[in-house]
Structure formats: structure tokens, C-alpha cells
Image (cartoon, grey):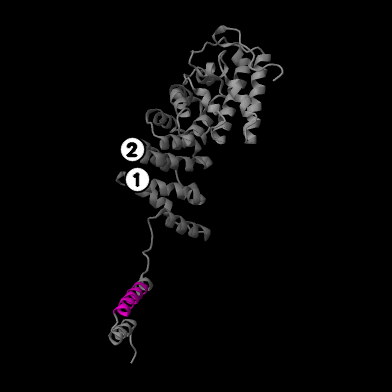
């Protein structure tokens, strides 16, 4: 007659009558129970996890079938949900847009508007996820114009809410879009906020802010607003060699574009006046120490930083050669001696 493992262990325990062996048998029995339970256990089918959604949907799309997951998520977003549920749904929608090209392209502008409406939610985490979802949709050409319609709202959020994660999400979205001219008045209003983010201590937000400012510095009607924006007295700390290379490179690109903008005939045709605490004075004013910082960066360990620092030096020297009008209407000294 066959015996089960527990029965065998029980008989072993009775025959031996040794406490140590009983303890060992008890352990073996518990181990047997655990193994048996593990064999019988079947993990529940996952239907709500973003990873499972992505796996199932990708598998179906690979076989030419519409998974329907993206549409289901968008429909569920229309229903009344708490803040946590909305955040998770938006997060899953973002994943699906990136992973399921066909289903994402089949969405409508009404879907973009629905996601955009989440920017008005009272919870910041919902706003952040909505910004990420809009960025995902902005990668699809036919939705770019619709996503652009939310640019002013995004700028308002960036300027009115001091939250690093929101700043990063919002700025990444804006940096992924060509900003139309009708947004420029709002950009002027939020310029101080962008400059504050640039001077914050959160590297990811700083990098995104400086990329947007570099893009805007190429707009003739915004250049003066950027240059006349007030900055902290220690603004040039952004050019210190101790800064992360990624941030240094972007700051140097920004400085080069500002210098090039000042050199343009369009800009030189006007006699501009700047505030004493302005960005212009910090970078190009008579008391600026930018030249010293740039010379130190020429020997920076990262090659792209070295090259970009040299580009700024050349641009600044060119500004002297073309006779850019100095700030505060005073003669401007040369940034570099001829020997340097």
C-alpha cells in the first residue's frame, strides 16, 4: 500500500523517537507543503498591469489583430475615477501609444482633447501623467497640431506650480513641439519662471528649461525678453566646471545662441537697454566674468563641452569685431586679450 510523503514522515518520527529528527521531519513536512502549494498555484491572469497590457497588446498587434486595449483605456478615462486610478490609466495609455503604433494612429482628436482635459485636474500626479501622454501623442504627426493647442495651458502650469516632476514633464512636451507664434505672448509672461527653473538645483528640470530657452533665443521677437530677464547674482555658477557635463553643454549652447542673436543686423538695429540684474549683464555686461569661466572650460574633461566653450569664445570675439552696441550705453571692454 502506497504512503504519502506526510505519512512516511510521520512513521519516521514515531519509529525514531528522537527530538532532533522530529524537528528535521517537521521542517521537511513544511517544505513538502510549500512545494505542493507552489505546484498547485496558478498566478491570476493580469489584465490591469501596464506591463501585461503591453505584452498582450503587442502580441496581438504582431499577429495583425487590434488588441483594443488603448480604446478600452481611453473609454475608462471618460468614466468617473479617483485621482490614483486616473494616473494609472494615463500611464497605461502612454505606454500603449509608444508601443502600439497602429492603435495609437487610429485614435481621434477627441481622444487628445480628453487627455488634455486632465490638465485641469486638481491632483498634480494626474497633470504629470497627462503631460506624458500628450508628449507620446505628439510623436504622431496628425496629432501634433491638436497637442499644440494645449501649449498655453502647459506654460501656465509650469509657471504657477513649483513641482520639479511637473516642470520636467511639461518642458519635455514643449521641447517636442514647434511652438506657434500665438504662444509667444504667454512665453514672455512665463520667462521669469523658466529662468528660475534654470537656476534651480534639479538637473533634469534645468536641462529641459535651458533647451527651451535656447530654442526661443532664435526667435527675433523673444530675444530681448530673454536677455532682459532678471537672474540671480550667481548665475555664472552654471558655467562652473563642477556642473554635470550634460547641463554645461546646454548652457554653452544657450550662451552661443544669445551671442549670435546679439550679433544679428536685426538686433543691432535697435539701441537696447537692460536691467542691471538682467541675463544680458550677467553674460555680456562690463563686469561679467564669463570669459574666465569659458577659458576654464576649454580644458574640461568632456570633449563636447570643450568644443562648445570654444564656439562661445569665437562668437563673443566676433561680437566685438562687429561692434555690438554695449549695455547701459557704455563702451564695452574686450572679452579676451589678443594673445588669448
Task: List x then y, in percent, for residue 97.
Answer: 47, 48
**Residue at the location (38% across, 48% down)?**
89
Q: Secondary structure at mark 1?
A: helix
Task: List x then y, in percent, for residue 202.
Answer: 45, 34
Task: List x then y, in percent, for residue 107.
Answer: 45, 46
Residue 33 on the magenta span: yes
Could you say which quadrant of the image residue 303 lies in? top right
The residue lying furthest to the right in this view is 339
Q: Name the disc covering residue 15, or none.
A: none
Q: Is residue 37 left or right of residue 279?
A: left
Q: Is residue 27 above or below residue 51?
A: below
Work out whether residue 93 or residue 320 is closer to the camera in this orientation and state it: 320
**CB under 8 Å between callouts 2 and 1?**
yes
Q: Name the disc covering residue 121, or none.
A: 2
Q: Secondary structure at mark 2?
A: loop
By secondary structure, the bulk of the magenta-drawn segment is best described as: helix
Label 2 Cα neighbours within 10 Å, binned few <14 / some 14-19 / many ≥20:
some
Q: Which quadrant of the figure contains the C terminus? A: top right
Q: Mark 1 = which residue?
A: 86
Q: Is residue 9 visible?
A: yes
Find the magenta span and give its range. Answer: 19-35
**Residue at the location (53% across, 59% down)?**
62
Could you say which quadrant of the image residue 325 lies in? top right
Residue 30 on the magenta span: yes
Amino acid at each position: 500500500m502506497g504512503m504519502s510523503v506526510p505519512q512516511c514522515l510521520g512513521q519516521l518520527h514515531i519509529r525514531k523517537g528522537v527530538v532532533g529528527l522530529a524537528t528535521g521531519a517537521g521542517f521537511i513536512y513544511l517544505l513538502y507543503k510549500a512545494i505542493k502549494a507552489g505546484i498547485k498555484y496558478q498566478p491570476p491572469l493580469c489584465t490591469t498591469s501596464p506591463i501585461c497590457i503591453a505584452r498582450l497588446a503587442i502580441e496581438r498587434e504582431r499577429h495583425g489583430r487590434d488588441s483594443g486595449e488603448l480604446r478600452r483605456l481611453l473609454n475608462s478615462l471618460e468614466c468617473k475615477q479617483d485621482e490614483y486610478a486616473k494616473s494609472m490609466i494615463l500611464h497605461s495609455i502612454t505606454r500603449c501609444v509608444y508601443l502600439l503604433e497602429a492603435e495609437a494612429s487610429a485614435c481621434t482628436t477627441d481622444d487628445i482633447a480628453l487627455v488634455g482635459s486632465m490638465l485641469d485636474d486638481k491632483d498634480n500626479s494626474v497633470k504629470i501623467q497627462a503631460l506624458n501622454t500628450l508628449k507620446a501623442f505628439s510623436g504622431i504627426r496628425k496629432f501634433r497640431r491638436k497637442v499644440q493647442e494645449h501649449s498655453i495651458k502647459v506654460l501656465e502650469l509650469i509657471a504657477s506650480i513649483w513641482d520639479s516632476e511637473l516642470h520636467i514633464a511639461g518642458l519635455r512636451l514643449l521641447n517636442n513641439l514647434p511652438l506657434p507664434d500665438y504662444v509667444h505672448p504667454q512665453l514672455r509672461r512665463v520667462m521669469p519662471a523658466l529662468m528660475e527653473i534654470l537656476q534651480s538645483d534639479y538637473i533634469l528640470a534645468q536641462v529641459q528649461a535651458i533647451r527651451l530657452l535656447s530654442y526661443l533665443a532664435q526667435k527675433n521677437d523673444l530675444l530681448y525678453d530673454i536677455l532682459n530677464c532678471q537672474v540671480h547674482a550667481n548665475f555664472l555658477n552654471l558655467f562652473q566646471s563642477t556642473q554635470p557635463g550634460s547641463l554645461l553643454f546646454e548652457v554653452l549652447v544657450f550662451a552661443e545662441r544669445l551671442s549670435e542673436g546679439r550679433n544679428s543686423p536685426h538686433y543691432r538695429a535697435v539701441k537696447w537697454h537692460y536691467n542691471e540684474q538682467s541675463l544680458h549683464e550677467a553674460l555680456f555686461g562690463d563686469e561679467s566674468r564669463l570669459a574666465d569661466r569659458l577659458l576654464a572650460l576649454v580644458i574640461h574633461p568632456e570633449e563636447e563641452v570643450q568644443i562648445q566653450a570654444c564656439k562661445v569664445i569665437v562668437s563673443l570675439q566676433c561680437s566685438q569685431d562687429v561692434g555690438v552696441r554695449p549695455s547701459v550705453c557704455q563702451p564695452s571692454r574686450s572679452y579676451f586679450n589678443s594673445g588669448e
